[in-house]
Amino acid sequence: MDPIIIKDFLYKVADDQLILGHRNSEWTGVGPVLEEDIAFSSMAQDKVGQSQALYELLHKLGEGEPDTVAFMRNAEQFHNCQFVELPTKDYAFSLIRHFLFDYAELIRFKMLMESSYEPLAQVAAKIQGEIKYHVMHARTFIRQLGSATEESVSRLQEAMNESVPYALGIFEKSKYEEDIISSGLFKGEEALKAEWMNAITEVVSQSSLTLPDLKAAEPKMGGRYGQHTEHLQPLLDEMSEVFRQDPMAEW
Amino acid sequence: MTEQDIYTLLKDVMDPEIPVLSLVDLGVITGVEIYDEDKVRVEMTPTFVGCPAMDYMKQEVEDKLKSNGIPEPEVNITFREHWSSDKITPEGRKKLKEFGLAPPPASGGANLIEDLDILEKVECPNCGSINTIMKTPFGPTLCRSIHHCEDCKETFEQFKPL
């Protein structure tokens, strides 16, 4: 399999993990209740750790050290979907993003356990076991808060309507999509999206929320090709501030 | 020096977060190989991909082997065999309980509960009751969840199934 194709695929998955991990970490110390503060912090730690394991795979394919890759690139060199870079905003938005993104992520890593690229299959087996907890957390709160008070339902619904076009951007296809599928690296974004739609539809149906028409929504694309919102570069500047001051520092 | 001797040595290296549990009991040592007569290669697998204690554990293993006459041990971290809570030994599970941390259910990964509001029936390490509820799957470290016992009213942690 051509390493260019594997690298293109790994970058988008790793960058999603790093950026959403960083956004989740913004709840540390300011969560709405202590358990949620801990939950988002813990999920942040998982995701950033998982991104490191994926950058390590990239390093073995000839890319830079994980720290360098994580902290020394500019926005247009990142391949995350735009959804994960949006500001944390309020708890309703963070929860909806966590729900919509983490279901896609769980299904992606389950599929990757079958990847023909063995090092990725091994890491994916491990990661999907961890993401199960993230999904369990998300679905529980979507069902509880999504059926609770008028305010909780309306705030989640508003966040859902805002999020869906960005969530559809998760499934933006790679320019190597056909090769990715035919080589057995990954089943492909279409297959992932189909399973994801079934999964989220089932959970949302158990709440008072309404899923917007997924076929009518206009997906926010471009992230996989380095086109980002105005929010990514300031996030990267903040993330890498310490590293850029002294890249050789030892802790 | 045999492979068994290495395992015996590593039984003295403790998990930094649960100091009653050795790395062997925890199940993170997934392979020991002696080659070229006296060279040692140890394989470790992380409990969690983002476990911050992994580098520390790796260093502890290297130091332990070096101080026991193995000049250049090779310690590799790998996902070839992935860690699950089923890798914790029976002795490790017993030690966890004595430490006040509920051991994970065996084969936990397969029957992982799907909702927080389902009563999980983890045995309370303080009073032995199973009238308990999971408060959150996310605890003070990635590998622990937080539970509450409805009988003795104590909050306790479980080494979570993975």
Image (cartoon, coloured by chain):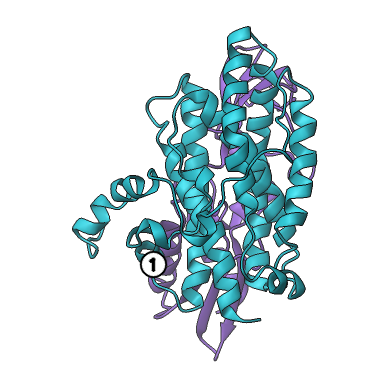
User: Residue visible at 46% across and 73% down?
Assistant: A59
Between B41 and A234, the residue placed more toward the observer is A234
* Residue sticking out furthest to the top: A150
* Residue sticking out furthest to the left: A245
Res B101 quadrant in image: top right
Q: Quick one: quadrant of the C terminus of chain A?
A: bottom left
Name the spot of residue A201 as percent of width and height, x first. 77, 33
The purple-coloured chain is labelled B
Residue B103 visible to the viewer: no
User: Residue visible at 72% across and 24% down?
Assistant: A210
Where disc 1 sits, the SS reads helix
Residue kind at label 1, given as amino acid type:
Asp
Circle 1 sits on which residue?
Answer: B63
The cyan-coloured chain is labelled A
Within-10-Å neighbours for mark 1: few <14, some 14–19, many 20+:
some
Name the spot of residue B78 as percent of width and height, x first. 57, 67
Between A159 and A242, the residue placed more toward the observer is A159
User: Residue visible at 68% across and 65% down?
Assistant: A121
Name the spot of residue A14 as percent of width and height, x first. 52, 58
